[in-house]
Image (cartoon, rainbow, N blue to C red):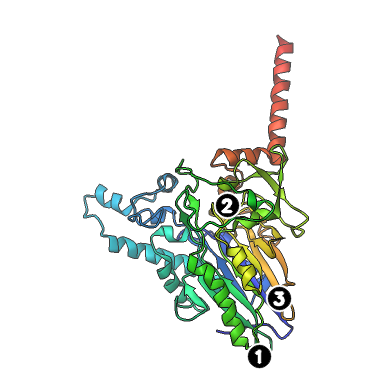
Amino acid sequence: MTLRFRDDGTFRILQVSDIQDGPHVSEDTLQLIGDAVREADPDLVVLTGDQILGYDPAYIDTFISRRGDRPGDHVRVVSRLEAAIEHVPSQRELCRRNTLPAPDEDTLMERTRQNVRSTFSQFLGPIAAHGVPFAATYGNHDFQCGIDVDEQDDLYREIDGCLNPVAGSGPLALEPGTFALPVLSSRGERIAMGVMMVNSGDYTLDGDASRAVPSTGPVSSGAHPVVQGRGLDLVDSDGYGVPSAAAIGWLADAERELSARNGDGVPVPAIAFQHIPTQEFYDCLREVPWWTMNAVEGTRAFSGRCFLLDETVCRPGSTLGESVNCADINVGEVAAMRHAGGYFALFAGHDHKNAYVGHAGGLDLGYAPTCGFASYGPDADLRGVRLLTFHEDNPSAYHTRMITWGELGGGAVHDKLRVFLGDYGAADAATVRNQLRRPKVAGAIGVAAAGLLSAIAAHRRRQ
């Protein structure tokens, strides 16, 4: 399938991030995706990782926390709790209770495979129904279901409209989740833009700095080394991953290939999409005192500091709802893009409450928040997808906006409690402090405190 600019010189991409659901995808998520596709009329949908909720109770028998684990050996505490609440027993446990032979690993993996296939068909249904092609990369939870991303690539390609190439099938197809899609001009005589999908990895071991390069941005240069053992199994522990060394080198190779196809040696304007943000995303923020309302605390390499959006580099309408959860090290991805030429933007997902677009380090750096309703995120009205509209004569001068549940008139969600807890829940001390800096929370605490003091005073007067 060939991508090309429309006759009016525009090309529209809809970024869909962090669906993060199990075999029964939320009705609200499906409605949001379908309504957004109708509203946006995109030429391409990019899925930027964590489509699969790898720790969903449905995958309890094949769950792997980290690569190299045996399936089912290290199930997260939260997965066991949710499985108990939802009465989703392990197949191994069911067989044990009923004195039946334990299911073999192949049987369990086939069950997971069918669940993943079902999940894909559900959330891609509204996209395929409109005949829109799609491309997918991967996040830190997709593989945890037990089906590796190589096989997930095969499952995506079973669905009409999938543009994921077979890894290694050409110079623009490096590995699962890392590939380039040329977009032809409206007349089809040249490549007018490149859409680069990058697999940003999943997890890395604490203290692994073998590929680290210094960050040079005004905020990111303040990153500090991290060696921190695993803590409570309520949030991800260990550091987040980074693109492979091959992927970093490929960024320039892909640009050269696109330029060679045009035959003029001029870098082709290109935008990259991936799951985990780079450290440079902190350069779209400014450091503020810890008591500042709406400030968020940095994590790991940026812990001990608080931040707000830097309005001087961020576009109007940008929102910061949580910390930038990047890798502990900088592996030079943004620098590689700058050096390659052509790249004008890098968009990520991963941080479900963030929806900002800023300019730092010579690139636009932007987020799409979660569009799902089965995991944590902002208020229901702010969950959504990002539309980017490019112009053939100057793709870097693109327009972008969020298309949200609230804007689409989605109304009341089916699972209000889950959405509320996903917005106001806290899994560690830093997120508790972030919640306390939210005006609504601080105001509610103030009102409650005033009410308590008033009640105490009234009680004393009656004595």
Who's the residue at 63% across and 38% down the image?
433
| Element assignment for label 2 | loop
Dot 1: few (<14), some (14–19), or many (≥20) neighbours within 10 Å?
Answer: few
Is the residue marked by circle 3 packed among few (<14), some (14-19), or many (20+) residues within 10 Å?
many
Of all residues, the one furthest to the top in this rendering is: 463
Q: Nearer the viewer, residue 306 or 351?
A: 306
Tell me the distance, in whole angstroms, between the alpha carbons under discs 2 and 3: 28 Å
Q: Which amino acid lies under the numbered mark 1 shown in the image of this protein?
A: Glu
* Residue 453, position as x, y percentages in the image: 71, 22
In the image, what residue occupies the spot 49% across and 53% down?
209
Residue marked by disc 3:
395
Compared with residue 316, is residue 10 higher up or lower down, i.e. above or below? below
* Quarter of the picture holding the N terminus: bottom right
- Cα separation between marks 2 and 1: 41 Å
Q: Position of residue 13 (x, y in %)?
A: 64, 72
395 or 127, which is in the foreground? 395
Q: Residue 276 appears at what percent x and percent y?
A: 56, 59
> Tag 3: residue type?
Pro
Residue matched to label 1? 189
Q: Identify the element where label 3 is drawn.
A: loop
Q: Is residue 98 visible?
A: yes
Q: Amino acid at mark 2?
A: Asn
Q: Nearer the viewer, residue 79 or 228?
A: 228
Q: If you read the primary sequence from the N terminus, does the residue marked by circle 3 or circle 1 appear first?
A: 1
